[in-house]
Amino acid sequence: MTSLIMGGIYALVGLALNFQYALMRIINVSHGEFIMFSTYLVYWLFTLFHLNPILSMSVIVPLLFVIGLILHKLLFERLLHTASTEVIETNSLLMTFGLLIFIQNFVSFVWTPTPRSVTFLNTSVVFACFRIST
């Protein structure tokens, strides 16, 4: 069952990448880094403020939306006014690769690269003959 959930998460990430490329022709290789950054924010809110990780999405999703909007206005809007689709694709790939490196180093600097985990909903539920972790 856990692999089914992980597959669903990968499908959602792939769908988001597909939408972004199909609508704006931006190849965003830094998409996963934004997901990583949001998980560190969830961890930070849980450890410092004891905020439920599920409820923290009500804070983090709008925050990441605003960050993405600012990055779009600062970085990608000029790029989208370029004449050629090939130039947009190539430059967006380079730009998002640089953004990927920046986000990785920022997270590594702020939270250090030490692995972390959160003990939250560590029980299981029996449904029919399946045991599903909460």
Image: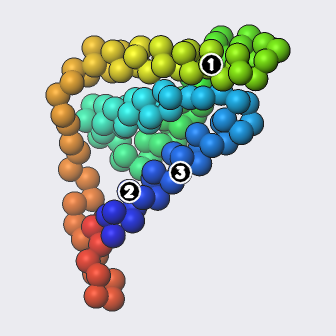
Q: What residue is rendered at 21% in x and 24% in y?
A: 113
Q: How far apart are labels 3 and 1 at the CA level?
A: 24 Å
- Work out whether mark 3 precedes mark 1 in sequence or the reverse, and give the earlier one: 3
The amino acid sitting under disc 3 is: Leu
Q: Nearer the viewer, mark 3 or mark 1?
A: 1
Left or right, residue 113 beside residue 91? left
* Residue under label 2: 6
Q: Is residue 27 above or below residue 17?
A: above
The amino acid sitting under disc 1 is: Thr
Q: How far apart are labels 3 and 2 at the CA level?
A: 10 Å
- Residue 1 in which image quadrant: bottom left
Q: What residue is rendered at 37% in x and 46% in y?
A: 53
- Residue 90 in which image quadrant: top right
**Marks 1,2: beta carbons within 8 A:** no
Q: Residue furthest front?
A: 86
Q: What residue is rendered at 28% in x and 88% in y?
A: 129
Q: Nearer the viewer, residue 88 or 5?
A: 88
Q: Residue furthest left?
A: 114
* Residue under label 3: 12
* Residue under label 1: 90
Q: Where in the figure is residue 133, as x and y percent of width and height?
A: 27, 67
The amino acid sitting under disc 2 is: Met
Judged from the image, the secondary structure of the residue bearing numbered disc 3 is: helix
Q: Where in the figure is residue 101, as x and y percent of width and height?
A: 40, 16
Crowding at mark 3 (Cα within 10 Å: few <14, some 14-19, many 20+) = few
Q: How far apart are labels 1 and 2 at the CA level?
A: 30 Å
Q: What residue is rendered at 35% in x and 15% in y?
A: 106
**Marks 3,1: beta carbons within 8 A:** no
